[in-house]
């Protein structure tokens, strides 16, 4: 196993010992990223509960944009398979969705199921144009653009301007899909988009579909729910899970000087935040490099080095991914378990010393 402590290569045991020592000294540790398979995510929550850490995810901006809107207005959603199989009209909101693998499937195929089977698929765009039949630049901002589309759909605005034309095409669709990236659209925009889908569905069928989530946030949300009964941003400082999206925002905690140690979990590769270097840190990553953190431990990537349950974007479900290139790299779950055992030993020794 490749491992580094303060930039110097070392063995697995020394790295785990150094990581445990760093976390044991922390008064307000954070476990962040959580881009891993379900086993490792569960192990991270277990460790957080034992050391009183808070948890946050790599894609929290998008996750909370969706959860915030869901809590207020609900959601009308579809799956990638249904979108490819049934949608005769797709509205792409923003630039990010054009980079999603799903776009190729939508562009290359016609609907094969339902009333729209065999018909051409119309691509509409708001905010960007990568080959849409009808595109609106929406220079005033994406949330504002979606709100304007709602006004046309509801009859509060009328005319042949681009937003009016797009609204008319959506209203005439047999199965419409509104494709978006929640991190790009933002919480207000997601709420507007869900409202648009619901209003269109009063006379036709229209659904939303989010793409582009960073890391494994869509796996973390259900794991967090069945583990704590709450959404991902939770803290265990009082030994029971407390959910607070603002308080347990890892970036905010580091910037405010509240966090004094971070464990970054990135077994599924995801961009590491700039703030990771601002605080003593441990990184469990699939693509290990000496400068990634104070203590770096290379772990296997689920679905490549070992099997694991991951979020399947194409099926919109948790599925098992077998190893495609098995290696000797340890799983993130096993390293987290070793850390938990070492920390338990350190804490037990500390209590013994205090008693003496």
Image: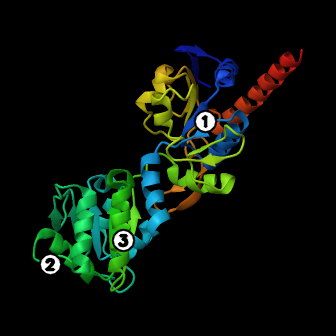
Bin the neighbour count of mark 2 within 10 Å (Cα to Cα): few under 14, some 14-19, many 20 and up.
Answer: some
| Residue 221 drawn at (x, y percent) | 56, 54
Residue 353 is tagged as none
- Secondary element at image label 1: loop
- Residue at left 33%, top 51%? 184
| Residue 125 drawn at (x, y percent) | 22, 63
- Is residue 211 toward the left or the right of residue 228 in the image? left
Q: 215 or 243, which is in the foreground?
A: 243
- Residue at left 57%, top 53%? 231
- Residue at left 88%, top 19%? 355
Relative to 205, residue 241 above or below: above
Q: Quadrant of the N terminus?
A: top right
Q: Earlier in the sequence, mark 2 or mark 3?
A: 2
| Residue 334 drawn at (x, y percent) | 69, 36
Mark 1 sits on what residue?
327
| Residue 56 drawn at (x, y percent) | 54, 42
- Secondary element at image label 2: loop
Q: CA distance from mark 2 to mark 3?
A: 19 Å
Q: Earlier in the sequence, mark 1 or mark 3?
A: 3
Res. 307 visible in picture: no
Q: Decide: marks 1, 2 in contact (CB < 8 A)?
A: no
Q: Earlier in the sequence, mark 1 or mark 2?
A: 2
- Is residue 257 toward the left or the right of residue 129 in the image? right
Q: CA distance from mark 1 to mark 3?
A: 48 Å
- Is residue 52 toward the left or the right of residue 268 in the image? right
- Secondary element at image label 3: helix
Mark 3 sits on what residue?
195
Res. 306 visible in picture: yes
Mark 2 sits on what residue?
158
Disc number lying in front (1 or 2): 2
């Amino acid at each position: 196993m490749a491992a580094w402590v303060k930039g110097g290569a070392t063995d697995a045991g020394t790295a785990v010992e150094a990581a445990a020592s760093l976390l044991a000294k922390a008064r307000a540790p954070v476990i962040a990223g959580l881009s891993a398979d379900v086993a490792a995510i569960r192990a991270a929550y277990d460790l957080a509960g034992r050391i009183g850490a808070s948890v946050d995810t790599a894609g929290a901006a998008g996750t909370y944009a969706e959860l915030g809107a869901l809590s207020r207005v609900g959601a009308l959603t579809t799956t990638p398979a249904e979108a490819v199989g049934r949608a005769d009209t797709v509205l792409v909101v923003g630039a990010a969705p054009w980079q999603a693998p799903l776009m190729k499937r939508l562009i290359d195929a016609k609907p094969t199921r339902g009333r729209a089977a065999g018909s051409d698929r119309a691509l509409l765009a708001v905010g960007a144009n990568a080959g849409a039949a009808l595109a609106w630049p929406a220079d005033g901002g994406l949330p504002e653009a979606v709100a304007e589309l709602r006004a046309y759909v509801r009859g509060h605005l009328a005319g042949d301007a681009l937003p009016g034309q797009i609204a008319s095409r959506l209203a005439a669709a047999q199965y419409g899909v509104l494709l978006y990236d929640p991190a790009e659209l933002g919480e207000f925009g997601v709420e507007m988009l869900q409202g648009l889908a619901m209003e269109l569905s009063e006379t036709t069928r229209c659904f939303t579909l989010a793409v582009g989530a960073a890391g494994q946030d869509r796996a973390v949300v259900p794991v967090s729910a069945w583990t704590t009964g709450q959404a991902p941003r939770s803290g265990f400082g009082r030994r029971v899970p407390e959910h607070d999206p603002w308080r347990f925002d890892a970036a905010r905690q580091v910037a405010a000087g509240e966090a004094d140690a971070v464990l970054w979990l990135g077994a599924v590769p995801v961009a590491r935040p700039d703030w990771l270097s601002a605080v003593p840190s441990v990184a469990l990553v699939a693509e290990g490099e000496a400068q990634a953190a104070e203590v770096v431990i290379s772990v296997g990537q689920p679905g490549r080095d070992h099997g694991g349950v991951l979020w399947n974007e194409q099926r919109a479900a948790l599925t098992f991914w077998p190893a495609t290139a098995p290696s000797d790299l340890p799983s993130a779950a096993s390293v987290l378990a070793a850390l938990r055992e070492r920390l338990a030993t350190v804490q037990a020794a500390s209590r013994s010393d205090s008693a003496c």
